[in-house]
Amino acid sequence: MTPDVPRDILFRARLGDREAFRAVLEAVQKLAFNISFRILHNAADAEDATQEIFLRLFRNFPQYDPGQPFLPWFRRLATNCVLNWKEKRRPSAELPDQVPAREDAAPDPSGLLHQAIRELPSEYQACVTLKYLEDLGVGEIARTLQVPVGTVKTWLFRAREMLVQKLKPHVETLL
């Protein structure tokens, strides 16, 4: 569900009205968390990144053009913020998200897919997340990431190719 923020609230928030800004935050809170979680795949990190999104929104709100739709502008701000947050916080060694109960246990297909997505370059992750999890079109993704449509198509193609290669060894074991 896409949040709806009335124009008058956006205008007042842009001028510094704290109650209006709070209303904007409440309207986009779930969207911000969803974007964060789908890129970071970790609830605690997503909560931290969501707070960073809100700080960036507060700092950049005066730059929002009220003549333009708010949600694409917010998605771009949130996506870029999470990607920057992720790059700054990249650990030197990652701990596994889950430890399998048994060595002979079958791998979780959903977990394999999420792990493969996490291993993609960040721009590919963003495209896959926005396309398949946020259900945005290629044009909307291009506007969100501020890249040409052709670049988005290339990134999506390459991301799918990389995912096929990463998941191919697991397909036979799951069938």
Image: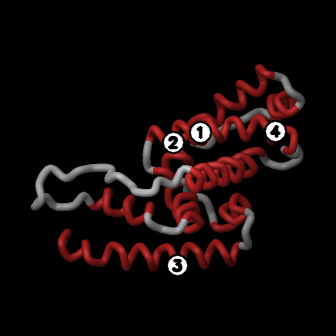
For marks 2 and 3 on the same chain, the one whose residue lies earlier in the sequence: 2
Disc 3 marks a residue whose amino acid type is: Arg
Residue closest to the far top: 19
Query: What residue is shown with label 4?
Result: 61
Q: Which mark is residue 46?
A: 2
Helix, strand or loop at mark 1: helix
For marks 4 and 1 on the same chain, the one whose residue lies earlier in the sequence: 1
For marks 4 and 3 on the same chain, the one whose residue lies earlier in the sequence: 4
Q: As drawn, is 167 to the left or to the right of 148?
A: left
Measured along the vertical axis of the image, is residue 67 above or below residue 8?
below
Q: Are marks 1 and 2 in contact (CB under 8 Å)?
A: yes
Q: Residues within 10 Å of mark 2 (few under 14, many from 20)?
A: many
Helix, strand or loop at mark 3: helix
Q: Residues within 10 Å of mark 4 (few under 14, many from 20)?
A: some
Residue closest to the far front: 92
Label 3, label 1: how far apart the Cα atoms are: 28 Å
Label 2, label 4: how far apart the Cα atoms are: 21 Å
Q: Position of residue 48 (x, y in %)?
A: 55, 37
Q: Which mark is residue 50?
A: 1
Q: Position of residue 110 (x, y in %)?
A: 32, 58
Disc 4 marks a residue whose amino acid type is: Phe
Q: Residues within 10 Å of mark 1 (few under 14, many from 20)?
A: many
For marks 2 and 4 on the same chain, the one whose residue lies earlier in the sequence: 2
Query: What residue is shown with label 3?
Result: 158
Specify the quadrant that holds the N terminus: top right
Label 2, label 3: how far apart the Cα atoms are: 26 Å
Query: How many numbered marks appear?
Result: 4
Helix, strand or loop at mark 2: helix
For marks 3 and 1 on the same chain, the one whose residue lies earlier in the sequence: 1
Residue at the spot x=84%, y=44% of the render?
A: 64
Q: Position of residue 21 (x, y in %)?
A: 76, 27
In the depicted view, which residue is nearer to us: 97 or 132? 97
